[in-house]
């Protein structure tokens, strides 16, 4: 058995360069949003956001207050508002079975409409 040497190696066999990862530090707004999601106490939220970003409590306070107000404005889907809107409608998509075409057995004569 002879080997073919003129074939290029496939991508899986080639040495691929390491993937480039974009490193972007989080913003204070993102830290405040995370803190609001962790606890309901405003003082703890400010402390968490300040510690995450390495800033003072006074610098983090306006961002946390803004994020907390935005979180209160949007109702939780678990609690609901008691009133259904168009956005609250539930759509269920179910997969149906495969449609099969039933052919007549072989040897059965087929009559077309033009031959009748």
Image: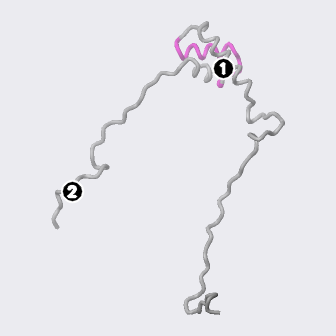
Color scheme of the displayed model: one colour
Callout 2 environment at 10 Å: few (<14), some (14 to 19), or many (20+)? few
The earlier-in-sequence mark between 1 and 2 is 2
What percent of the width, then of the height, locates residue 10? 28, 52
Is residue 29 in the magenta section? no
Q: Residue at x 53, y 15 (%)?
A: 53
Above or below for 48 versus 110 = above
Q: CA distance from mark 1 to mark 2?
A: 59 Å
What percent of the width, then of the height, locates residue 34? 61, 24
Q: Main SS of the magenta segment?
A: helix
The C terminus: image quadrant: bottom right
Q: Quadrant of residue 60?
A: top right
Above or below for 34 versus 110 = above
Decide if residue 68 is on the left or right side of residue 81.
left
Outermost residue on the front side: it is: 114
Q: Secondary structure at mark 1?
A: helix
Q: Residue at x 56, y 17 (%)?
A: 28
Decide if residue 71 is on the left or right side of residue 21.
right
What percent of the width, then of the height, locates residue 26? 51, 22
Residue identifier under label 1: 67
Q: Secondary structure at mark 2?
A: loop
Residue identifier under label 2: 7
Decide if residue 92 is on the left or right side of residue 101.
right
> What range is drawn magenta here?
37-54
């Amino acid at each position: 058995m002879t080997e073919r040497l003129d074939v290029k190696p496939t991508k899986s066999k080639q040495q691929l360069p390491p993937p480039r990862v974009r490193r972007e530090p989080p913003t204070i707004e993102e830290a405040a949003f995370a803190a609001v999601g962790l606890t309901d106490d405003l003082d703890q939220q400010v402390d968490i956001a300040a510690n995450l970003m390495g800033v003072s409590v006074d610098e983090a306070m306006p961002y946390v207050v803004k994020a907390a107000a935005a979180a209160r404005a949007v109702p939780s889907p678990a609690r609901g508002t008691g009133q259904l809107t168009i956005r609250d409608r539930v759509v269920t998509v179910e997969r149906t079975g495969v449609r099969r075409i039933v052919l007549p057995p072989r040897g059965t004569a087929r009559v077309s409409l033009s031959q009748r």
